[in-house]
Amino acid sequence: METISEKIKIDKSNQIKYLQAEIKHLQDDIKVLKKKKNLKDHALNVSQNSTVITDFRGKIIWVNKAFTRLTGYSLEEVIGKNPRILKSGKHDEEFYNKLWDTIISGKSWHGEIINKKKSGELYHERINIEPVLNDENIITNFIATKEDITGKRLTDEALNESYIKYEELAYIFNQSPAIGFLWSENEERSVEFVTENIKQWNYTPEEFYSQKLSFSDIIYSEDKKNVLDEISEKINAGKERLKQHYRIITKNGDIRWVDSHLYVRLGENDSVTHLQGVVLDVTDRKMAEEESKHQLEQLMQADKMIALGTLVSGVAHEINNPNNFVMLNIPLIEKVWFNILPILQNHFEENGDFSVGDRLMYSKIKQSMPLLLGGINDGSQRIKNIVEDLKSFARKDSLGYNQEVDINKVVQTSVNLTANLVSKSTEKFVVKYSPKPLYVKGNKQKLEQVLINLIENSCQALSERKQSVKILIEQKSNFAIINVSDEGYGIKSDVIKKIKDPFFTTKRNKGGTGLGLSIASKILIEHNGTLDFQSEPEKGTTATIKIPILNGESK
């Protein structure tokens, strides 16, 4: 039998084993708890929202990494501190008192706060604060979960501001004469949106939305086909912006002129689904243009006469009379030459070659004299043609802007008319014509007027005959381009902005009126063209004329 001492030894051994087993279980539990704690800490730290844990007095005992990233404070800087270090000053004491009263009563608090980072930058947070209670229902801690909503608030403010601006824009739009449209690019041209100011034509938006009316219904019948065909052509050509000028008819039957500025809206596969833009009533402007047209014609005619005052009186009068004398006497000189030729030939055969002038021998002059006389006759005829061009140029035209004009011929005539001035101004005059005719729709005489004005300006800009004047005609895309360049004194940048203004001139002391380039620019506008200048002082100036070619191509 076991002794008592042996039994005691066995019991102690069992107790030790039991205690060791319990210790191991506790150690295992501790490891599990540590793993759970680490996992929770990790979950809180990888969260995008800030988490702050305080004791029951509100002293911070832990924050996650999202808090430190957002506020700029490190964990060490905030431990033991109160969250009031984030106060921005944007909330009063009553706000914070209500918050504190709520959570110390054991209730949750939800709301938005504007706080301040360590850097002083303000930010918006949506916060949820939960009290933590022990088994005896006593608050031991507070946990605050905070979401940064600064971006959302800024977005909301931007949206609100955009809405206010939209309302203001809509008000301005509806008070303006420009009518906004959005219609489908289909056969019906059904209107999906139109601004309220369509009422200026006595229509209502509802008439379009109910499909009682389409956009094409209000286009004046005589213009409708051209307008719709042009829209289709431009869309098929890949144009994204469309500008048109045509007439519409109001609900009362009045005819109004409009400028239409449209943009295409693309859908799938870049196909055009809608047209959007504004239609502006320009009837009053149109009437004013018609009223001023007569005055403009008078100014243009006056400018012609100013230019011709020197050309016609200085060329036609001074050249035409002596030229007539030459033309009348050349036939007589030819007759005398051929009558005297047998006598001179007989003397040559009997006595040999002889001199008939300074170093001119009869044997040579016999062959060249008919050519010399012919050249004089041709030159006189050319002078006569120039004078006729001057008279034609000075004649008031009545052909409008519907001629088919060959740009090469316009330049050629203009060069002929200014040949005398050019020859006196430069020994380097170059004209490069287009290899094929370029036809534009317009008025030949008025285009000649523009070219003559530019050639005269280039010649007057030269300081010596070695400097050149060049004219280049070429086609770019669907436009005829004419460049008139000189190597003269150039134009300063502050002056070049004004040279097309009416009555602005740098040649007042030379009799300039300042109408030349202003009228030239208006003439080109009438041709749907432009006149632009590029210049560099002491290096020269280039005037560029750009006019659309008839039917988009050279004839």
Image: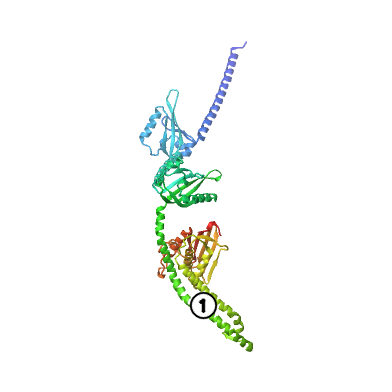
The quarter of the picture where the C terminus appears is bottom right
Protein image colouring = rainbow
Where on the picture, by quarter, is residue 153?
Answer: top left
Residue 398 appears in the figure: yes
For disc 1, the neighbor class at 10 Å (few under 14, some 14 to 19, many from 20) is: some
Where on the picture, by quarter, is residue 553?
Answer: bottom right
Residue 293 x/y as whole percent: 41, 60
Residue 221 x/y as whole percent: 46, 49
The residue tagged with tag 1: helix, strand or loop?
Answer: helix
Image position of 199 with respect to 369: above or below: above
The residue that disc 1 covers is: 327
Residues 68 and 370: in front is: 370
- The residue under the point 57% across, 78% down is 372
Left or right of residue 88, residue 351 in this image: right
In the image, farthest residue toward the bottom? 351
Residue type marked 1: Met
- The residue under the point 57% across, 18% down is 15
Where on the picture, by quarter, is residue 435?
Answer: bottom right
Residue 425 appears in the figure: no
Image position of 95 with respect to 281: above or below: above
Residues 149 and 499: in front is: 499
